[in-house]
Amino acid sequence: MSQRKFIPKEIKTEIISKVKSGEKVADLARQYGVSDKSVYTWLHLETGDQAVSIVQYNRLKRENEELKKLIGELSFKLSLGEKNRAG
């Protein structure tokens, strides 16, 4: 049977702030020694129904950055291929 440990409000606020700024819930939960479920519960209590939206927004933001990087790499490779054909 697991024992519930007290997490100070300051720590909860710090974790919520970091999630809102884009850090991953799983990484923060591991770093602070709390469960993912606890973090999601705090988010829900803090932001109401927006908690899921914040997490989804951050996931989509990271995915968007990865896609932009991939598009840049592909565009560069295509431009190199066109230069080789022209020369």
Image (cartoon, helix red, strand yellow):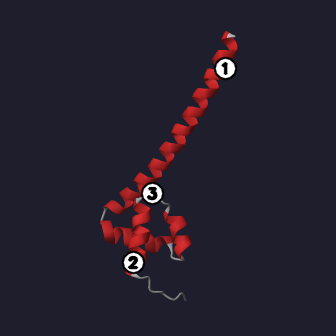
- The x, y position of residue 51, in whole percent, is 36, 62
Residue furthest top in the image:
86
Contact between marks 3 and 1 (CB within 8 A): the answer is: no
Q: Secondary structure at mark 1?
A: helix
Q: Nearer the viewer, mark 2 or mark 3?
A: 2
Residue furthest left in the image:
48
Residue 81's label in the rendered image is: 1
Residue at (58% x, 27% y) in the render: 75
Residue at (55% x, 33% y) in the render: 71
Residue at (37% x, 68% y) in the render: 43
Contact between marks 2 and 3 (CB within 8 A): the answer is: no
For disc 2, the neighbor class at 10 Å (few under 14, some 14 to 19, many from 20) is few
Q: Which residue is mark 3?
A: 22
- The x, y position of residue 79, in whole percent, is 61, 21
Q: Secondary structure at mark 2?
A: helix
Q: Secondary structure at mark 3?
A: loop
| Residue type at numbered disc 2 | Glu
Q: Which residue is mark 2?
A: 10
Whichever of callouts 2 and 1 sits on the residue coming sooner in the sequence is 2
- The x, y position of residue 54, in whole percent, is 38, 57
- The x, y position of residue 1, in whole percent, is 55, 89
